[in-house]
Image (spheres, helix red, strand yellow):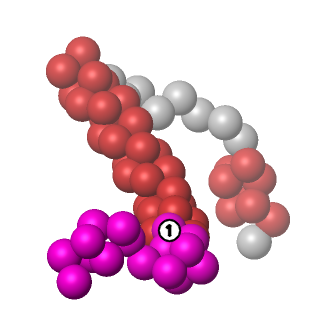
Amino acid sequence: MLGLSLAALTPNSALAYIGPGAGLGAIAVTIAVAFGFLLLLIGLVWYPLKRLLKRETGGSKAKDKSE
C-alpha cells in the first residue's frame, strides 16, 4: 500500500501532445463556456429585476396608450 501511494505521488511526464488546432479549439470552448456561465448569471439577476421594476412603475407606457 505504501509503495502504491509513493508511486502515485511521484511526478511523471504525460508524454502528451495537443496540436495547434485542437489547442485553439480547447481554448475557444473554455472561453465560450465561461461566457455562457456569465450570461446565465446576468440573466438570473437582470430579468427578475426588470420584472420587479416594471411592476413598481405600473407597467409599460405603450400598453397604456393602446387602451
Task: State the quadrant of the C terminus.
Answer: bottom left
Along the line of sight, which residue is nearer the eye, 24 or 50? 50
Label 1 amino acid?
Lys
Residue 18 seen by the camera: no
Name the secondary structure under disc 1: helix
Which quarter of the picture shows residue 2?
A: bottom right
Q: How many marks?
A: 1
Magenta stretch prevailing secondary structure: helix
Q: Is residue 17 magenta?
A: no
Along the line of sight, which residue is nearer the eye, 13 or 57? 57
Specify start and end residues of the magenta stretch as a single range.
50-67
Position of residue 10 measured from the top left corner of the image (x, y, whole percent): 71, 41
Q: Which residue is mark 1?
A: 50
What residue sits 50% from the left and 68% below the top?
A: 50
Q: Say if 58 sits above or below 2 in the image.
A: below
Please give left or right for residue 30 compared with residue 5 in the image. Answer: left
Q: Say if 52 sits above or below 62 in the image.
A: below
Residue 36 seen by the camera: yes
What residue sits 19% from the left and 76% below the top?
A: 66
Which quarter of the picture shows residue 25?
A: top left
Along the line of sight, which residue is nearer the eye, 26 or 46? 46
